[in-house]
Image (cartoon, helix red, strand yellow):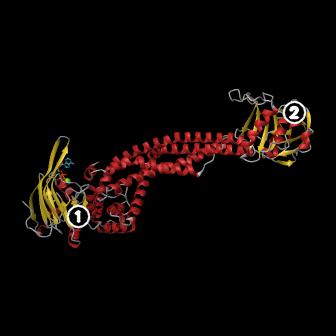
Amino acid sequence: MNTDRDIRISAPLIRLENIGMIYKIGDISYEALKGINLIVENGEFVSVMGASGSGKSTLMNILGCLDRPTAGKYFLEGRDVSNLTSDELAEIRNKKIGFVFQGFNLIQRLSIVENVGLPLYYSGMHSKEATEMAMDALKLVDLADTENKFPNQISGGEQQRVAIARAVVNNAPIIMADEPTGNLDSVRGADVMRFFKKINEERGATIILVSHDKNIANYGKRLITVKDGAIISSTVIETKNVV
Amino acid sequence: MLKRVKFAFFLDLKSAYKTLLRNKIRSLLTILGIIIGVGSVIATVSIGQGASEAIQSTINSMGSNMLIILPGSSSLGGVHTGFGILPTLTLDDAYAIRKLPAVKTDSGNLGMAQQVIWRGNNWSTLIMGASSTFPEIRDWPVAKGTFFDHQQVVSAANVAVIGNTAATELFGLINPIGHIILIHNVPFTVIGILSVKGFNAFGQDQDDTVVIPITTMLEKIAGTTWVHAIAVSAKSKEDTVIAQSEITALLRQRHHIPLHKPNDFFVRNLTEIAQAANSSANTFTILLASIAAVSLLVGGIGIMNIMLVSVTERTKEIGIRLAVGAKKKDILKQFLIESSVLSLFGGILGIAAGIGISNSISAFSPLKTIVTTEPIIISLVFSLCVGIFFGFYPAFKASRMNPVEALRYE
Ligand SMILES: Nc1ncnc2c1ncn2[C@@H]1O[C@H](COP(=O)(O)OP(=O)(O)OP(=O)(O)O)[C@@H](O)[C@H]1O
Ligand SMILES: [Mg+2]
């Protein structure tokens, strides 16, 4: 159950210590995460599964530095990030993390290429360079021809792939994907998963992926199962499981 | 760092512009307050400037360093009760004043409305009796022919110099010089035409006049020895004050006024009066402009309101931007730029409206208006400040959003 299998001299990429998350809605408080302990090494490909409402997105938000846990400590590359200011977290999100959200979360008023380039704009890159990199990322997901369209002019599956392009555009060492294939058919879904596998293997990016679909989850190398806000298992995925 | 500022700024500007165009009607309604505010500031200031300029040109048209002496008693609460009611000034007073050291020239004046007849035409105009120094004092040379000389004044000659309007009304296209006109049944030979002077600050056509020697006026038209006014030109601007006291002393002596009695005349320094009028016109302009500026503030509140709506509407967008690494100041800047572009745009439209109003006032009313660059620049800066000031709170609100909560917003 406990995931810290071995002790290392160098700090792991991600280490969660007794992370808890309590949502308060008025007087009622809801404990979405309870004492999560997790270590993710650099270059891992971790799949997270669990029932709806089990706390997967909550966990991803904390891992992605979008939200601060209400209890416990989060060490990213050995640095405690559980108490950073919102601007410091923004800096980490911008440089280290590419996030694919459960919804598409594209900005309607920006064109596809502008959406993809958004993280670069906030990293202070020059316009021309940012546009070129955004185009490269769009090519990776096979959507180079949509650059000047707007999100409402492309299909749901295409929007999902644009969101993926945006997550990888800044060459972030960590990619977090919350149901990245939820809006895709199985062929497109498999394409996306091969894409993640490729950037995991070629770029050495660490990937943490949430999916309901066992076939999708099996693209990873390790499977974490979440139930009622706690991690109930962490198993190595046999290569033969990959479809 | 510079690159970052440049690029992010450009992107925000573009996005602000797009947002503006996306809701054209809403944007227009939002900036209406600014448009009206800036427009009325520009228009009122242009009217004020026009008034100042008119007063200035009246000062100039009156002739330089001019003093005017009017009959009347200052014991009546200092209020002058009507021109020429009190017969105290004579032509001899005028001749005596001419000899004072600070005085360059003088001209006794008597004006009255009279019918002027030439052949079948008659025209009612202002007949002015004046001395031969009239063109010099009033800074008003003849355009054609000659003015009467001192000799003609002394001999009370029947000669007339007519203003441009009176000339046109009586003679049409015919050259009036050498023709005989009748004033009060007395024949006068036209010897000259005055140059065109135009309207004064009070909207009077100064060219609608006929000037004859003051002596002729007194003897043959008015039948009196009293003059309405004596116009005096001091040697210099500084001399106007000296001339004023010299004239006062001289006239008191000539009129045998005992020490304890008040003057039976007024000496008015026209430059001073005009300057006073000018400064009160300025005060009035400032007052009007500040009232107009209040509507700018109201416009600012409109901008704040719409920015708050915009921030709420775009919560999800803000969440996305934060999620991909926008910092508080990036969001703050984005919305500040948006509100500034909005108000600046209002400012520009307001300036256009103001210039339009000011031009149509010039065109369709006797008021003269002048648009200068100063109020334009001030309006632009002011509307930019309004945008930043009233956009700050909504932008601040946007920058404080929690990314996860913002992303969940539908
Ligand atoms: N902002 C919030 N305020 C209150 N409760 C929340 C909030 N976010 C999540 N929750 C609750 O926490 C629990 C876990 O939510 P979470 O979104 O992490 O589930 P999930 O595992 O991602 O589910 P799904 O598979 O449907 O996406 C849910 O019961 C949810 O209602
Ligand atoms: Mg979820």
Toward the bottom, the furthest residue is A202
Label at residue A91: none
On the question of residue A100 being in view, the answer is yes
Name the kind of residue labelled 2 in the image. Answer: Leu
Give the number of the disc on residue B218: 2
Residue pushed farthest front? Answer: B259
Q: Residue B12 in the image: x percent, y percent?
A: 40, 57
Q: Secondary structure at mark 2?
A: helix
Residue type, mark 1 in image: Ile
Question: In which chain is the residue bearing label 1?
Answer: A
Mark 1 nearby-residue class (10 Å; few <14, some 14–19, many ≥20): many
Which image quadrant is residue A48 in?
bottom left
Residue B93, compared with residue A159, is above or below; it is above
Quarter of the figure with residue B16: bottom left
Q: Dot 2: few (<14), some (14–19), or many (≥20) neighbours within 10 Å?
A: many
Do discs 1 and 2 belong to a common subunit? no
Q: Quadrant of ligand 2?
A: bottom left
Per the image, the residue denoted by label 1 is: A175
In space, the residues marked 1 and 2 are separated at their CA atoms by: 107 Å
- Image quarter in which the N terminus of chain B is found: bottom left
The residue closer to the viewer here, B125 or A104, is B125
Whether residue B126 is visible to the viewer of this picture, yes or no, is no
Q: Is residue B97 left or right of residue A180?
A: right
Q: Position of residue B87 (x, y in %)?
A: 81, 28
Would residue B42 be found to the left or right of residue A137 on screen?
Answer: right
Q: Position of residue A27 (x, y in %)?
A: 18, 40
